[in-house]
Image (cartoon, rainbow, N blue to C red):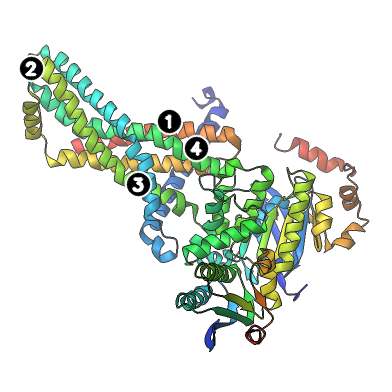
Amino acid sequence: MAEHVPASLVIALGQRTVQSVRETGYLAALFIEALYWLALGRWRRQPVRLSAIVRESMHVGVSAIPIVALASFATGMMLAIQGIYTLRSFGAESQVVMGIALSVTREFAPLITGIFVAGRSGSAIAARIGTMQISQEIDALRVIGINPVRYLVSPLLAAMLLTLPALTVLATVLGLGGGALYCAWGLSLPPEVFFDRSFDVLTTTDLTHGLLKSTVFAVIVTLIGAGNGFNVKAGAEGVGRATTRAVVLGCIGIILADMVFTFLTSR
Amino acid sequence: MEVHLDDRSPFRVVRLSGDVDLHSSPRARQAILDCLRAGSPVLVDLSGVSYMDSSGVASLVEGYQLARKTRVEFGLAAASAPVLNVLRLARLDQVFPIHPSVEDRLSRG
Amino acid sequence: MAAHDAAIEVEHLVAHYGSRKILDDVCFTAHQGEIMVIMGGSGSGKSTLLRHLLGLNHPTSGSIRLLGKDITRLDADQMYDLRKNMGVAFQGGALFNSMTVGENVELPLREHTRLDCNTIRIMSRMKLEVVNLSGFEDLMPAELSGGMIKRAALARAIVMDPRLLFFDEPSAGLDPVASAELDELILMLRDAMNMTIVVVTHELESAFKIADRITVLDHGRILMSDRAEAVRQSDHPRIRSLLDRTPRSDSVDPEAYLQRLTREIS
């Protein structure tokens, strides 16, 4: 068996595995350090400044509103179109409201928000930190006595943890709105009836479920973006690679975490 | 650093001594600005200063600026070599009125 | 020159990058108020040595004492306190691109002190005056020329009046006039503030103009660390070839050479 597999492949696989484990460990350490400065920075003469958190919140959260709003509205509408089309063959198109309400709140709103923020901000974070790494700005921070994780990652993490759940709530409302609009047209179902029925089936657990997910996504996007930025070694090409990697790994990370989370909470 | 205030009519003399550095210069600044805000002309006696960093110099600059705005006299007296060096670095020796000593300024009325 | 107490003492410093030895038993001393130039060609290990002096890399073994404190043994808090006495001007300036020149220069003060806002602003403008960049504080780093970026980086490095100043390749990428101005500035800073200044460079002319002492690095080893005059008159062949700008022509050790070419090939 073994002789059919080229040795180089096994070695490459082994190296890949070691590297992945090392990277995961690195990201975990980064996470703990970022939280540490958020919690204790004030007592270690390295406070995480509120102004920095607000600034990052504007970048990652507020300016993502239009795109997230549009995407979640379209997704809600798409679910309604698809749901009515599928359920019509069973003559059960009136059940579409329940389907939309649950899947938007528990699944699509946090997922769409996470993916879009990963695409917008994950790459931007990696590019910014990567550029700072190659221009020695990170070294400059360190020699001035400013911890780069405290200065760059902690405010970002806080901003993500604040804005991603907020964006998710917005995405939920607009996703339901998109569904309601299509149902009003396709099923002649008045929007207020759509929302009444939605709130009948939805529980607070469904909403907290979606919000919890979004906090996990916030951590994933921040860490993968920042981690790839810090690990840029050489030149502009390295920054390009890091940004691509941050987006791809960020999206994959979100989808995998979503799968695990859904598996654990839907049983 | 020690700050000592003295009334040598018409001047208020702010006598600084020791090291004027990042930690102590805010006290020097406060003393100088307080005297100026009270409306009296100020002489800063630097004879006892062993070391002054740029936060100390910045405090003097701020004092001089306030004095000019409120049109009262502001001068430095008895600047030692280390202080002069720091002033010279930013060419501020050409900006401040620097007197050889407090007595020298007072004797000129 | 003032008191001759040692500001920088490096003893038996060994550093590796992966399995490659970059620094091998490096020892030298720089006294307070002295300008020490670390000289060497590319690949001599001078940048690595600087990174170790700045506490950015950890050595394999050996000690680095800055102002009497061994930075290889300091904890984060002690290092933080020591950093207030260290200023660094990086080769490319390393100004923060998202901030104006003024904000860059003010940053160390904002992080380390609780001085009044006006005091901070006056201090940073004074330092911009010193480096001849008055009136440029509202520009962004991207709007400055190479020489201006270096001078702004120098202003940021000295804004806390540090006792130790490190300057990486001050003349690299500058025209002769701009680099001569920087040399003058370095001399002026030492004279006015009695700073200990470490300059890493491969520019001979600038090195001899400013140096009190010169440390010559070659392949990670110290060839010589002595007064500038002594280095100029040295008859060490490698130093001579550096000074006379002749390409190196050391004899080949066949055994070691073959070993290098065939390493990790079975």
Instruction: Name, please, the residue furthest toward the top.
Output: A89
- Secondary structure of the residue carrying tag 1 is helix
Residue position marked by numbered label 1 in the rendering? A248
Q: Distance between the residues labelled 4 and 3?
A: 18 Å
Instruction: Name, please, the residue furthest toward the front.
Output: B109
- Observer able to see residue A20: no
Label at residue A159: 3
Q: How far apart are marks 1 and 4 (CA)?
A: 14 Å
Badge count: 4
- Secondary structure of the residue carrying tag 4 is helix
**Image coordinates for residue C234, horizontal then vertical, percent:** 91, 58
Chain ID at mark 2: A
- Disc 3 to disc 2: CB gap under 8 Å: no
Question: Which one is in front, A119 or C9?
Answer: A119
Chain ID at mark 3: A
- On whether disc 1 and disc 4 are found on a single subunit, the reply is yes
- Secondary structure of the residue carrying tag 3 is helix
Q: Which of marks 4 and 3 is nearer the N terminus?
A: 4
Foreground mark, 1 or 2? Answer: 2
Q: In which quarter of the image is the C terminus of chain C?
A: top right
Q: Distance between the residues labelled 3 and 1?
A: 22 Å
Q: How far apart are marks 3 and 2 (CA)?
A: 41 Å
Please state which amino acid type lies under the numbered disc 4. Answer: Ala
Q: Distance between the residues labelled 1 and 2?
A: 41 Å
Question: Which one is in front, A77 or C266?
Answer: A77
- On whether disc 4 and disc 2 are found on a single subunit, the reply is yes
Residue position marked by numbered label 2 in the rendering? A188
